[in-house]
Image: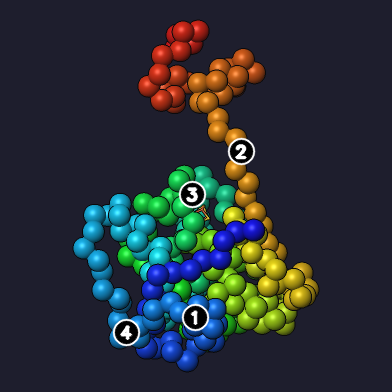
Amino acid sequence: MAQPYRPRHVWIDRQVLGSPITANVLRQLPGVPTTVVDGPPPVPRLPQAALMSVSKKQLYLTAQKGRFVRPCPGMTSRRPAQQLCCHYTIVDLIYNCNYDCTYCYLQSYVNAPYLTVYANVEQLFAELAALLRAQPHRLVRLGSGEFSDSLSLDPLTGFSRLLIPFLRQFPNVLFELKTKSDLVDHLLDLDPQGRVLVSWSLNPPPVDPARGAQDGLAGGAPARRAALPRRRLPHWPAL
Ligand code: SF4
């Protein structure tokens, strides 16, 4: 089972002191130093690479100042004729991830020196209700896995234990929790009534790009030498 996340420090924005998410986190982390702040926590003076590792151990509970719910960038593409959009809707509950998947774009994308949890759930539920009531005849697909893992902090925050009962009133929703964790035990007694699903992505064994390209060519795939890393291939056909 995945190790439960334990930060070195919890920073709580005064605005979310009364949030049930804050209460859940504090209940789960006895003994972890906690500071109430009136704005973002102090930023340690460290090189960017070091800051990324440090940031994952600094948990910051604050309010979402923008919108929790927004369309996937594909919906607002400037090239709609070239792109087939699946009309996915993104829900931003957390920004940054406590895992260290080396291939993940978040490792270089996130520029905040802490792991941010947006704890003002009443705004989240208001936005979700408005979205789902406005489209009663369409199945609205949502997911919270764009800027973090959906469940790696969930035993601490208790987001899903609030979200799942809330979503039962909407027959037109499918909410996807994307995770690399196995942290689902705290959800097993809840019945999502088909409104929520948990999904996992699996990593394949490492692929040798040269071998893969040669296999592709042998199978008739239009591979190009230019797509490979700089590496000499004795039997590579000239292009
Ligand atoms: S668990 Fe997901 S979001 Fe987190 S680092 Fe890995 S790929 Fe990125």
Q: Residues within 10 Å of mark 2 (few under 14, many from 20)?
A: few
Residue drawn at (23%, 59%) of the image: 46
Q: Amino acid type of disc 1?
A: Pro
The figure's colour scheme reads rainbow
Q: Sort mark 1 into few (<14), some (14-19) or many (20+) by Cα contacts within 10 Å.
A: few
Q: What whole-number distance in Å separates the C-alpha atoms at marks 1 and 2?
A: 38 Å
Residue at the (64%, 58%) spot, across then down: 1
What is the three-letter code of the residue carrying label 2? Pro
Q: Residue at x 24, y 54 (%)?
A: 47
Q: Are the residues flagged by discs 2 and 3 in contact, CB closer than 8 Å?
A: no
Q: Is tag 2's residue or tag 3's residue first in the polypeptide sequence?
A: 3
Q: Is mark 1 within 8 Å of ligand 1?
A: no
Q: Which residue type carries mark 3?
A: Cys
Q: In this rendering, which labeled residue sits more in front, label 1 or label 2? A: 1
- Look at the picture and state if 105 lies above or below 59: above
**Which SS class for mark 1?**
loop
Q: Residue sitting at 35 percent across and 61 percent down? A: 54
Q: Secondary structure at mark 4?
A: strand
**Residue that protrudes farthest toward the front in the picture:** 31
Q: Nearer the viewer, residue 77 or 57?
A: 57
Disc 3 beta carbon < 8 A from ligand 1? yes
Q: Work out how far the residue at label 2 is from the one at label 3, CA to CA, in angstroms.
A: 13 Å
Quadrant where the image shows the C terminus: top left
Q: Where is mark 2, residue-wise?
A: 204
Q: CA distance from mark 4 to mark 2?
A: 43 Å
State whether residue 209 appears in this view.
yes
Q: Which residue is mark 4?
A: 37
User: What amino acid type is highlighted by mark number 4?
Assistant: Val
**Label 1 sits on residue:** 30
In the drawing, what numbered circle is on residue 184?
none
Q: Are marks 3 and 1 in contact (CB under 8 Å)?
A: no
Location of residue 97 in the rendering, given as x and y in whole percent from the top left corner: 47, 61
